[in-house]
Image (cartoon, rainbow, N blue to C red):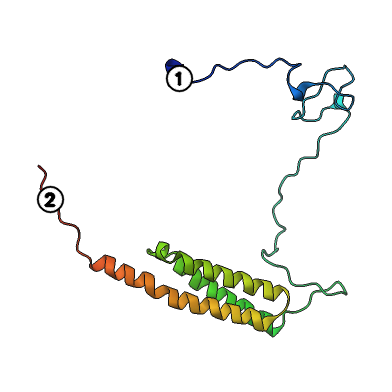
Amino acid sequence: MGLLDVLGLQRPTRAIEPAASPKLTPSAATATATGQPVRRNDPPTATTGTTPPPTVTPTAPPAGATTGTPPPVNAGGGTTAPTQEEINYEAERKAVMALADALRGHKQAARIGSVLNQITTKMANAAGQAVKKDWTKAMQDLGAARTLCGSGKTRPDNWQTYSDRRPPPPRWPAG
C-alpha cells in the first residue's frame, strides 16, 4: 500500500466491463471465427485471418564495405568521380566541423549558445547548397561558419580566463 493510498489521495481503480470498452465492441471486421471480438492492440493471429509482419533482424555490413555516403551514381549505372569542388567542399566542411565541435566542447560553451546556433545554421545552409551543386554559395556559407567559429571562441576564452583568475569567495567562520 502506497503513501497516496494511506492518505486517501489516490482514486481507487475500477474494473472496466468488456461491453463498456470501445476497444472490445464486436464488429463484422474484427470478429473471429469463434465470434469473440478482437482488441485493437492485439497482435494478429491465425484465427483473425491475417498474418503478423515478418521480423526484421539487423545484419552486419559485408566484409570490406565502407560506411558513409556512397559516391553519386550516373545515368549509366556506374559511379562518377567526385569533382574538385566536391573535394574542396568536403575538406572545408570537415575542418569547420572540427572547429565547431571544439567550440561545443569548451568549458564556457553555455555562454555562446547563440553563436553555436548560428554556426549550425550556416552549416545546414552550406549542406543545402551542396545538394543543389551550388558550390560557390556552399563555400561562402562554410567560410561564414569558420569566421563565426573564430570570433565565437574569444568570448568563452575571456570568460574562462576571468573564472581562473577570480579569487574564491571568502569563507566565513561558522557560528
Left or right: residue 164 compared with residue 105? left
The answer, for residue 93, to whether it is visible in the render is: yes
Q: Is residue 129 above or below residue 114?
A: below
- Separation (CA) of disc 1 from disc 2: 44 Å
Left or right: residue 168 compared with residue 100? left
Give the residue drawn at x 85%, y 33%. 51
Residue type, numbered disc 2:
Trp
Give the residue drawn at x 72%, y 78%. 133
Count the numbered circles shown: 2
Give the residue drawn at x 70%, y 60%. 63
The answer, for residue 92, to whether it is visible in the render is: no
Mark before the other along the chain sequence, 1 or 2: 1
Tell me the crowding category of disc 1: few under 14, some 14 to 19, or many 20 or more residues within 10 angstroms, Cα based.
few
Residue type, numbered disc 1:
Gly
Percent position of residue 85, x then y: 68, 83
- Quadrant housing residue 77: bottom right
Percent position of residue 21, x then y: 73, 21
Give the residue drawn at x 90%, y 24%. 28
Tell me the crowding category of disc 2: few under 14, some 14 to 19, or many 20 or more residues within 10 angstroms, Cα based.
few
- Quadrant housing residue 160: bottom left
Q: Quadrant of the C terminus?
A: top left
Question: 123 and 5: which one is in front?
Answer: 5
Label 2 sits on residue? 172
Percent position of residue 113, x then y: 46, 64
- Quadrant housing residue 159: bottom left
Label 1 sits on residue? 2
